[in-house]
Structures are given as structure tokens and as C-alpha cells.
Amino acid sequence: MFLSMKKVLPILCLLAMNLNLFGQMALDVHSHFSTPEFLQVLAKHDALLDEGFPIPDWTLEEHLKFMENAGIEKSVLTLPAPQPYFGDTGETAAIIRQTNEYAARLKADYPDRFLFCAALPLPDIGAAIKEAIYALDTLHADGIKLATNSRGQYLGEAELDPLMQLLSDRGAVVILHPHKPDPYNQQVMQQTPLAMYEYLAETTRALANMITRNVLARYPGMKVVVPHCGAYMPLAIPRMKAIYPAVLAKQMVGEIDWDANLRNLYYDLAGSASAQVIKMMLTITSPDHIMYGSDYPYVAAPVLTMKLKQLRDELKADAELAPYIELFMSNNAVKLFEK
């Protein structure tokens, strides 16, 4: 039986009020999940604090509650640091497979709420390629998550080229995420936690390594999402370009195709987004390459909900950025992940 208009109108008004409260629902390209099995492997190797701070508790129910309260329609799930490799490729491959299959089940059970980017069992290249094929073809992963380094194996290294070729051939979205640098200074890490500084430096380091080898230019099918408001890239790119003629003349680097490398980079707004930061990001990219990210559950849900509302309000009040709000919040990510 159809509802009368008298009954339908209040429902429509309530929906309109909710849409007004949040604006268009956001798509979150930067969120994490974990499984008990993943945590057990880390605990077995005394690695739960490998990144200098504990992995936050995560449950499906709390993640969905956060999304509802914040006005997030869909979240892209990725496995957090550290890389669960402790010298045994078989162990790493098994736990990576378990987490990828769990994420795939979440997507299947909640197709309107979750996407996922699969983890890979690096530093073993053969195992990583095998898992990438399985994740993309069988699990229908929406992309691949790559650590800036996997136990010292940095993005941009030549041994990773076969994996980059595969991801380019598949037109894969690649979510980057910083991991503890290798090697690292223990005293510095204890005094200044990684998340305060080094994660941004680590992301920039890995990207610089990729750019100087033209990885993104040579494998143009990949679409790479840079976390945390582009890290230090708005400062690093002008610096790299300025010094490039001198180091090229001394044959310290080869020819770099700047445009081809940079056009394949996208950027999320996790961490410290503001109108001022976004304007800095726009010195190295365009409005269609910026998208919302929360970093849930590494920041408390009420804080993230408040920060998302504040960001929307700040952007609405900025004449230069206001036209791009829905691009940043959802439309760019929808286009990036569309099949």
C-alpha cells in the first residue's frame, strides 16, 4: 500500500534536513581496519608497537556508527602499519590473504558502505604479484595499498618494476601510506613520534624516489593517492625542480618527466586539512585530484566528525574553494574508483 502524501512529506523533509546538515555525503578514501589474526601475528613478533604507538581498536559496528554520525556514505578500507613481515614470506602471505578476504567480505556484506584496497606481502615481489592478481581478479579489490617501504624496500626501487607494470596494466588505484622508515633513529622516534613529523617525510621520500626513476611516468595506468594532505610535496616539488638542472648536469639523476609523473598523483585530506593547506596543495595539483580522507580509527570519531563539519564550513566561507566542496568530499573519489 502506498503512503499518502501527508505521511510522505514529513519523511522527505527529515531527509532533506539530514542532507542539509552534512551537505552531500562524503566518500572517505583514507580509513583503516584490522583483524584479530593480524594483531596476533604482530603480537607473536613483539611488533604491536612497531610504529611507536598502539594500533587503535577497530570494530565494524563502531566504524559504521562513525560514518553515520559524520555523514560519510562510503569508506575505503586499508590495512594499517606495520608490514607483517618478519623474515617468513609464507607467514606474511597468509596473514595478508586473511585480511584481504575479510575486507572483501565487508564489501560484499555492505556494498553501499565499503570499498577496499588490498595489502600485499612485500618485500617478496613474486608473492606480492600473486596476491595482487588474486585480490583484483577474485576478490574484486578496488585498488592496492602500498607502504612507503616494506622493511627497507622503498617504492621506486628497480626490483619493484614488475609489480608496477602489473598495477599499471590493470589501471589500479594505489593508496600510499607511510610506514616507519628503515633504517631509523630510535632516539628521534621516541622523542618525536612518527605521526608528528616522520610520516610526512617518509611519504615525501618514497614519492621523490618514484619520481626520480620516472615510475609514475613509465607506468601511467596507476593512479596513486598520496596521504595526509600531500605530506611535504608542496614544498618538495619546487625544491626538486629548482635543483634538477644542477644534479642532471652532474649526471646524479636522469631525465625526469615532471608532468607525466605528477599527473598520476591524487591527494587525500587526512590529518590537517584546512583552506590554507588545500591552497598549498593546489600549487602542485588541480581541484579534481583532491579528496576527503579521515584516517579513522587513528583519530577519535567525535574529533573527526567535528573536523569534517569545520572543514565544510571553512570551505563554504572561502570564495575560491567553495565551488569545489563536493569535488573534494565525494565526486573526485567516485570518479577515481568507478569501474
Image (cartoon, rainbow, N blue to C red):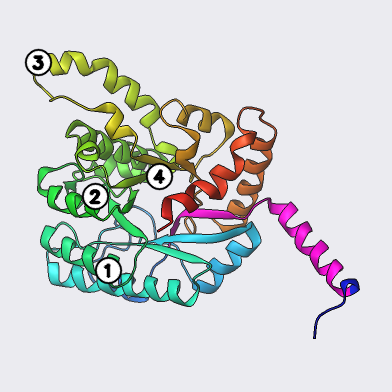
Above/below status of 157 relative to 13: above
The crowd level at tag 1 (other Cα within 10 Å; few <14, some 14-19, many 20+) is few
Are the residues at dot 3 and dot 4 in contact (C-beta closer than 8 Å)?
no
From the viewer's perspective, is 233 left or right of 127?
right
Label pair 4/1, CB-CB below 8 angstroms: no
Q: Secondary structure at mark 1?
A: helix
In the rendered structure, which disc, 4 or 1, sits on the residue that comes first in sequence? 1
Q: Magenta region: which residues? A: 7-32
Residue that label 1 marks: 137
Residue at label 4? 227
Q: CA distance from mark 2 to mark 3?
A: 31 Å
Residue type at tag 3:
Lys
Q: Earlier in the sequence, mark 2 or mark 3?
A: 2
Graded by Cα atoms within 10 Å as few (under 14), some (14 to 19) or many (20 or more), the crowding at tag 4 reads: many
The residue lying at 41 percent from left, 37 percent from top is: 230
Residue 178 position within the rendered picture, expressed as x and y whole percent measured from the top left: 32, 47
